Image: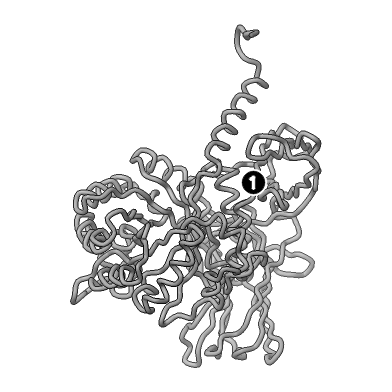
Amino acid sequence: MRRWRGPLPRHALRLAATLLLLAGWSAGAWAQEVWFAPRSPHPRVAADRDWAELFAADAPWAQARAITKVFHFDGTYVMYYPPEQLHEKAVALAQRGIAVAVGIQPVTRDRDPTCGIAVEGFDDPRSAPRIAGNLTAANVALRYVTMDGPLTFGHYYDGPRACRYDVAQIVQRVATAARPFLERYPDVILTEVESSSLIERPDFADRFRRFKTGFEAATGRKLEVVQLDMAWPDPTWPNQLRRWRALTTALGMRLGIIYNGDSLDPTGEAWTTHTIRNFATIESTLGILPDQAIFAGWNDVPTHMLPETSPSAMTYPVAQYRLARTRIVLDPGRDRLAGRLLDAEGHGIAQATLRVSTGFEPHDPVPVHVWTGTVPANAAMALLAVRLNTECGCAPSANDIVLGPLTYRETGSGSVEQTYDPATALARAAHGDARQPSVALIDRNGAPMARVITRPDQIFMLNSEKFRVTAGAQATLRVALGAVKPDGMAGAVSIIWLDAAGKGVRRATLVDRGDFRQVAAPTTDAEGRFALQGFDPSRPVRLEYAGDARFRPAFASHPAPH
């Protein structure tokens, strides 16, 4: 074998690094345990209309079902519905090799509680024994118990009715909830579910270790798995995930990632598209392969499970997950953008079309974002709102946006039209006040607009005057809004629905996750290569491969996600 003596050429070093990355990316590519965790029926909450159909032998999710290894039931379903119903469903799952998991709210409240009432993660001390007993009565072979947010809600949550228990108290209360399951199911696997954003707290890693050690001592059982409820609206979630991977690896724990969209997705199809983008970004772009991939939903959408061929059904992204992984590897130069589209083994994918889009800049045409929906039945009035770094379900961040008029219009049974110009109000509020965002007025063909720049510590809230609306009418909100930052805006544009007394009843929200305009659609050559000349490396760019019947979608960004 010929050996190279002396320093490696730059292209050889780049090739070696790429091969090492691909080796790690493809290793164990199909080792995950796939979970399906749709919202179970609840006595006080309407179930998705076709949830029960999932258990039929001919239910139209055969491809998604074929890769599903665990089905998750909410503890409330097990507690309130007849054991014979659960038995029938568990038998149907077992016939297809699918195990059962049950979710509990693990922080046991006091019998006469002064906190933890109607707080996620908390439950009555009688609930866990009842759930475990009903599972036994239904003759269910239970594989997993998922414990929802013991540290997220029991320790760190500081909202209304918070308990803020210390770690030792959390250990004892969660151990109390776990024991009824351990007594009836000695081989059950205990799984902790926490918010991904906790990892950013300076004290969290130490307190997580203390909880794990204390819980294992109290129960005599290992805490083997942690599943992450990802903070998708926070643009720093990729870094959160990297830190969680390092922590769980150090502790010898398996890592599960909950794949879903979020409450800001307006439709079922938007939710499933968001879900697919999330798992493709994590597994292909970031190269992180979880031990468990959990497809879970608790938002208003999707509203149906089936069929798996429908892009708005919850089983759709599970079916897409079975496809082969792909990856876009970029090699940006001074005035060019080149790269390759690869499969899981590192082979080029030929004759594939990519979508290349560049980020928004202030001099570009301003995109128009649209929300369409129905005015709530109990709404009598509304106001239009702009929020930056607050009331957005997002982490505070620097903002740089161009914002134009908001236009509300009803159709069908309604005829209300309302336009709100926030640009002038923004400039007036910020004038001469260094604590407020920087605001510059812009005239775009007679339309008043404002460029708004904030620091992460600057919060801004702006409301229109109240106006009458027509309950039950179809309504549309349009806003000219462009985000200069690739991650979009840390904020929201909303309709706040009010009842006749002026009390808020609901919100309809538009968010900007980043504005990109397609500029090219290159096709890969026989080795999966592509190249674009005249590329400006200072401007953010996104690349997308839509996938096909064999391959998953792939996404890449320049600069890469942080």
Spot occupied by residue 204 in the image (x, y as percentages of width and height): 32, 49
The residue drawn where x is 21% and y is 74% is 114
Spot occupied by residue 552 in the image (x, y as percentages of width and height): 66, 50
Residue 514 falls in image quadrant? bottom right
Spot occupied by residue 442 in the image (x, y as percentages of width and height): 70, 62
Image position of 396 with respect to 56: above or below: above
The residue drawn where x is 64% and y is 46% is 324
Residue 249 falls in image quadrant? top left
**Quadrant holding the C terminus:** top right
- Closer to us: 313 or 397: 313
Left or right: residue 297 versus residue 165 is right
The residue drawn where x is 20% and y is 59% is 172
Query: Can the viewer see residue 512?
Result: no
Residue 402 falls in image quadrant? bottom right
The residue identified by callout 1 is 324
In this picture the colour scheme is one colour
Circle 1: residue type: Ala
- Closer to us: 101 or 533: 101
Left or right: residue 176 versus residue 118 is left
